[in-house]
Image (cartoon, rainbow, N blue to C red):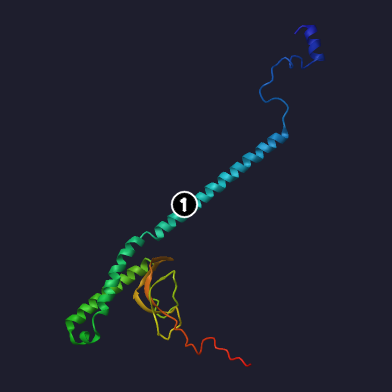
Amino acid sequence: MTGSEEKEFIDNPVSGAEDKPEAAGDGPVDLAALQAEYVAIKDQLLRAVAETENTRRRLTRERDETAKYAASSFAKEMLDVADNLHRALAAIPAEALAKDEVLKSLFDGVSATERQLDAAFTRQHVKRIWPEGEKFDSNLHQAMFEVPGTSQPSGTVVQVLQAGYTMHDRLLRPALVGVAKGDAKPAGEAGHVDTVA
């Protein structure tokens, strides 16, 4: 450096700084704009994390339900087998069992098969619905007819035509039932009020 350049440098140490072009974004910083951008990006990130968590929970729930009810279609097909075994056992009169040893052996074999099927249903959380004597529930029962003169309260299941079944908390098949019909009271008893003139 020459003497005059050295003196100029000492007097004005940042000379030439104004000559450099400004890089993009090196201007004055708008703090409010940066804070708004930060808040917007943070909001987007939180929403993305929440959506990912909701998706994970939904997929986990769907996977668990699929595993829980995987055997439901097979169980529905086996209900007819259970019904037929039950009908076969019910069709054999008790007197015939006492007289015929071969029939008794057949009865015992069919009974054992029915017990095995019931045990398999129990392992798969399939539960039989036999609502005789219970209050009619349209979520579990299907009324096929009304039965008058049963001396039962109206809406009570008095006959079960076919058992219903549930698997866990889902209905596989409603029970087919006959329901007690409330009998009308005789004209003299219903709503009669004596009045004095």
Q: Nearer the viewer, residue 163 or 8?
A: 163
Q: Which residue is mark 1?
A: 59
- The amino acid sitting under disc 1 is Leu
* Residue positioned 32% across, 62% down in the render: 74
* Residue positioned 78% across, 13% down in the render: 9
Where is residue 135? Give x, y as percent: 45, 77
Q: Is residue 128 above or below residue 59?
A: below
Q: Quadrant of the C terminus?
A: bottom right
Q: Nearer the viewer, residue 130 or 183?
A: 183
Residue 116 image-quadrant placement: bottom left
Q: In the shown orientation, is residue 162 left or right of residue 188? A: left
Where is residue 40? Give x, y as percent: 64, 40
Residue 69 is at least partly visible in this image: yes
Q: Secondary structure at mark 1?
A: helix
Residue 127 is at least partly visible in this image: no
Q: Quadrant of the N terminus?
A: top right
Residue 26 image-quadrant placement: top right
Where is residue 34? Give x, y as percent: 68, 35
* Residue positioned 56% across, 44% down in the render: 48
Q: In the shown orientation, is residue 73 left or right of residue 190? A: left
List the single residue furthest toward the front. 197
Mark 1 closeness class: few <14, some 14–19, many ≥20 residues within 10 Å: few
Q: Nearer the viewer, residue 117 or 137?
A: 137
